[in-house]
Structures are given as structure tokens and as C-alpha cells.
Image (tube, rainbow, N blue to C red):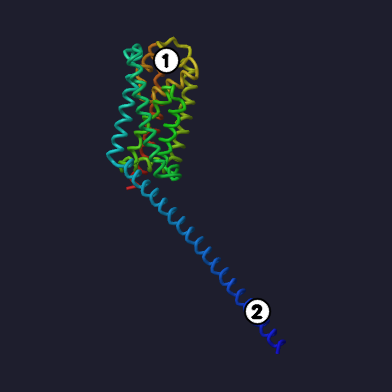
Amino acid sequence: MVRFDEDTNFDEEEGYKKNDSKDGDDNDSNSSSNNKNNDDNERSTALTTAKSFLVKIQRSRYYIGGLVNNEFVQLAIILLIVTNAIMMGLATMDWVKENPEVSRIFRGIDKGFLVIFTIEISMQLYYFGIALFQDGWLVFDLVIVTISWAFESLQVIRAFRIFRAFRLVTRVKPLRDLILAIGQVLPRMTAIGFLLIIIFYVFAVLFTELFSDLELSANYFNTLEDSLFTCMQMMTLEWGDVTREVMEETNRWWAWIPFVSYIALSGFVVFNLIVAVVVQAVAATE
């Protein structure tokens, strides 16, 4: 009987131990589940916060982009560019350069323009991000503003900001079509350009050989460089005075022949080719 009781007590103790072990496992499982749920909640909260932040950033980008690319804002920027260019011209005058106070005011205003241009391109960069570098005009703006800060003391570099006004080309459809047409016919234009260079060189050598010994009012044909420059001048159809002076200084009746030949080739044939190519390309885009 005693042994039976001991066995019974032993079995009961074993049962208690098993129950305690099972309860411990359940508690561990519940604790792990709670920890996992807490981690999931933290991740969910973090993701929600991140998404909310990204949404706010995206909204701010759209707002900034709509503001800086507003038609009136862009017109104001262009007006500032023109005004800045005019002031750059005025700054070269003696009444500005000789007056330190006025010169200082002009430099301060110029710095103000540069700050405005910097804010504008910074807003564009914030709106477009990396995509800004896919827009050639915006890249041009960024380069001009960056160079203006890097070489602020160089007036020549700052003057290039006026080229920002070329952005008007992208907003006027006929001008856009013309630019696209020129881009399409660029290979043919390059060929015509090489033809024009050959004509320049041939006639420059010819004029130098024929007329370098003449004493003219200017060094029209003394050297090959002078002849090339004179050929460029005559191509603009300012050739009558040069031709008459050469004919007066020499008794060669045929002196007009090379001039007329040059003008006929460069001033009429080549430029008519250029016009024809551009007109054909523009007509093709319509």
C-alpha cells in the first residue's frame, strides 16, 4: 500500500511537472508572439511615417515646380535677365566706373540678380531632381549660374547669363520648329560649311597672290590672314569699295573678275543652298 501511494505521488508529481513545462512553453510562445507583433507594429509605424514623409516631399516638389514654372514667374525671370544685361551695359560707362559709390551699387544689384537666378535654378533642381540634366536649357542655366559664382570677379563670364533668354525658343512653336529643322539638316549644313571654307581658302590665296603688292587704304590682301578676313567681309556683300580701290590701283582691267566670281559663289550660290535646305526641312516638319 505504501509503495502504491509512493507511485501515485510520483505520478502526480510528474503530471505537475509536465503541466508546468507545458505552461512555460505556452508562456514563451505567447511572449515570442507578442514580441513579433511589437516588431511588426514598429515596422508598420516606421513605413507609415516614411510614406507620409515621402508624400509631403512629393507634394512640396510639385508645389515648387508649379510655382517656379508658372508663366508669370518665368516672364519675371526673363525680365530680370534683360534688366541685368542692360545694367551690365551701363556698368561699362565712364559715369559708373569713375564713381566708386555708383559702381558699388551696381555690384550690389548684380549680386542680387545672381542670388535670384540661383534660387530659381535651385527650385528647378529640387523639382526635377536628376531629370534636370535631361533638359539642355536647364543644364545651360545651371552651368551659367555655377560659373557666375565661381568666376564672380570676371565680367565676361557673368555676361553669358543673358543667353538664358534663349529659353523663349522652347515656348514659341515656330521657333521650336525652326530649331528642330536646323537640327535635322545639320549634316547637310556641315557639308555646305565645308564647301564655304574651301571657297574662302581658294580665293584668299588667289587674292593674296594677285593683290598683295598693292598699297591700299587697308591691309586687305597683304597676307593670307588678311585675305581670309577680307573674304569674310565681302561675303556680307560689302565688296564694292574694295573692288573699286583695287581697280584704281592697278591697270588690270580684269581685276573685277575674281571679285565677282567670289561673290557669285559665296554670296549667292552657297547661301541660297543654306536657305533652300532650311526651308525644305521646315516644310517637312509642318
Residue 273 location, quadrant:
top left
Q: What number is the disc on residue 115?
A: none
Q: Nearer the viewer, mark 2 or mark 1?
A: 2
Quadrant position of the N terminus in the picture: bottom right
Q: Residues within 10 Å of mark 1 (few under 14, many from 20)?
A: few
Q: CA distance from mark 2 to mark 1?
A: 139 Å
Percent across and percent down for residue 66 are 32, 45
Looking at marks 2 and 1 on the same chain, the residue that comes earlier in the sequence is marked by 2
Left/right placement of residue 241 relative to residue 9 reads: left
Percent across and percent down for residue 76 are 29, 34
Q: Residue drawn at (39%, 22%), measured in percent from left and top?
A: 233
For mark 1, give the secondary structure: loop
- Above or below residue 177? Residue 251 is above
Q: What amino acid does circle 2 point to? A: Glu
Depth order, front residue of 266/13: 13
Q: What amino acid does circle 1 point to? A: Arg
- Above or below residue 66? Residue 243 is above
Left/right placement of residue 66 relative to residue 138 reads: left
Residue corresponding to mark 1: 252
Left/right placement of residue 3 relative to residue 170 reads: right
Q: Residue drawn at (43%, 44%), measured in percent from left and top?
A: 129
Q: Residue furthest left?
A: 72
Depth order, front residue of 66/31: 31
Residue 9 location, quadrant:
bottom right
Q: Residue furthest bottom?
A: 1
Percent across and percent down for residue 25 are 59, 71
Residue 265 location, quadrant:
top left
Task: Determine if residue 258 is in view.
Answer: no
For mark 2, give the secondary structure: helix
Q: What number is the disc on residue 13?
A: 2
